[in-house]
Image: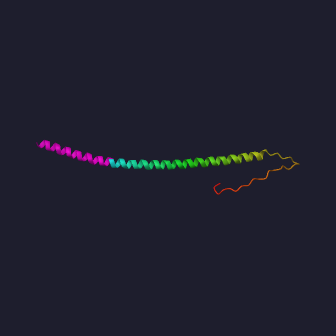
Amino acid sequence: MMVLAIQVIKQLRKDSQMREAVGLIQRETGNMLNDVRLLCERVNKLKGHFGQTAKDVDDILTSAGKIEKRAGRIEELEFDSDVQPELPMPVTRALPAAE
């Protein structure tokens, strides 16, 4: 009878430890889920920054291409020593503050 009582006590203690471990595992799993959510938010934010950077680089390349074309047109102008070339009137436009 004494052996049976000792086994029951051991089993009860083991069950108590398992319940305690389950609670700890559940808390840690909840913390990990929160960390994963935060990580996803931060990755998406960084992705947005990279997207904006790529757009800015594309805009810069567009401007550089326009400058290159204008320089090419200027290089193509031929000047006779007797004749002054008739240059087109420069086009002026107001630039927005962001450009």
In the rendered view of the protein, which quadrant contains the C terminus? bottom right
Position of 46 compared to 6: left or right? Answer: right
Q: Position of residue 95 (x, y in %)?
A: 68, 56
Identify the residue at horizontal 66%, vertical 47% (top origin): 62
Q: Position of residue 26 (x, y in %)?
A: 33, 47
Q: Position of residue 41 (x, y in %)?
A: 47, 49
Span of residues in magenta: 1-25
Total residue callouts: 0
Q: Position of residue 22 (x, y in %)?
A: 29, 46
Q: Residue 30 lies in magenta, yes or no?
A: no
Identify the residue at horizontal 53%, vertical 49% (top origin): 48
In the rendered view of the protein, which quadrant contains the N terminus? top left
Position of 11 compared to 36: left or right? Answer: left
Front residue of 71/99: it is 99
Q: Residue 8 lies in magenta, yes or no?
A: yes
Identify the residue at horizontal 57%, vertical 49% (top origin): 52
Find the residue positioned furthest to the right: 82
Q: Main secondary structure of the magenta part?
A: helix
Please say which color scheme the image uses.
rainbow
Identify the residue at horizontal 87%, vertical 48% (top origin): 83
Position of 21 compared to 31: left or right? Answer: left
